[in-house]
């Protein structure tokens, strides 16, 4: 519960919700991004260094957008820049050199200017949840000014709105 002025509103603990809903809660039929762990991504114990999970989130996000025809190259050609505003990762179980992981990414929020993505990293059998995380992004023009995508690129707006609506309808 958060109080703003005299109004109280319920604010869910997103990390708790993500963990509770993480086990196979990805979109029905969603295709994961597969990543084979490289030696350079590990430490002296052959365990993946924590910084690489955020890189994997980006790889999965870009692959999912590209699969849907919303790849960054196309959007940048249209003058849309999508910087990362925040990134978080909660590590559950170590990933080791030579393993391949499944990474699910899903747009979970969109307000016309910003959007959020949530991630789940599993082993190949989806029995072990290795990590969960989130990133938030915004839309800027080439001059780094906030961009009204509804006006500038209606198909981009519709895509992100549909993805966020689909996520909301799962719960």
Image (cartoon, rainbow, N blue to C red):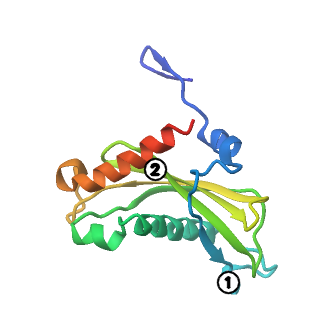
Q: Which mark is residue 89?
A: none
Point 30% across, 64% down: residue: 81
Q: Residue furthest front?
A: 29
Residue 30's x, y, as percent? Answer: 56, 58
Point 35% across, 42% down: residue: 111
Q: Can residue 146 be seen in this view?
A: no
Distance Cα–Cα, label 2 vs label 1: 28 Å
Q: Which mark is residue 38?
A: 1
Which residue position is annotated with label 2?
A: 116
Residue 80's x, y, as percent? Answer: 26, 63
Residue 144 or 64: which is nearer the viewer?
64
Helix, strand or loop at mark 2: strand
Helix, strand or loop at mark 1: loop
Q: Quadrant of the N terminus?
A: top right
Other residues around mark 2 within 10 Å, as few (<14) / some (14–19) / many (≥20): many
Number of disc labels? 2
Other residues around mark 1 within 10 Å, as few (<14) / some (14–19) / many (≥20): some
Q: Can residue 37 be seen in this view?
A: yes
Choose top left, top right, bottom left or bottom right for residue 66.
bottom left
Whether 24 is drawn above or below 36: the answer is above
Q: Which residue lies furthest to the bottom in this view?
A: 39
Whether 62 is drawn above or below 104: the answer is below
Point 18% across, 55% down: residue: 152
Residue 25's x, y, as percent? Answer: 64, 47
Q: In which quarter of the image is the C terminus?
A: top right
Residue 137 or 21: which is nearer the viewer?
21
Task: Judge left or right: residue 110 versus residue 1.
Answer: left
């Amino acid at each position: 519960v958060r109080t703003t002025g005299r109004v109280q509103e319920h604010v869910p603990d997103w990390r708790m919700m993500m963990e509770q809903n993480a086990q196979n809660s990805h979109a029905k039929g969603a295709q994961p991004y597969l990543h084979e762990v490289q030696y350079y991504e590990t430490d002296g114990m052959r365990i993946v260094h924590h910084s690489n999970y955020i890189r994997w989130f980006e790889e999965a996000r870009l692959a999912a957008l590209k699969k849907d025809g919303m790849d960054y190259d196309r959007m940048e050609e249209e003058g849309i820049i999508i910087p990362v505003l925040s990134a978080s990762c909660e590590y559950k179980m170590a990933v080791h050199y030579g393993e391949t992981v499944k990474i699910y990414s899903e747009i979970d929020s969109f307000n016309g200017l910003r959007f959020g993505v949530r991630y789940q990293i599993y082993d190949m059998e989806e029995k072990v949840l290795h990590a969960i995380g989130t990133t938030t992004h915004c839309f800027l023009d080439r001059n780094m000014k906030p961009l009204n995508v509804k006006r500038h690129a209606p198909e981009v707006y519709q895509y992100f709105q549909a993805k966020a609506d689909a996520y909301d309808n799962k719960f």
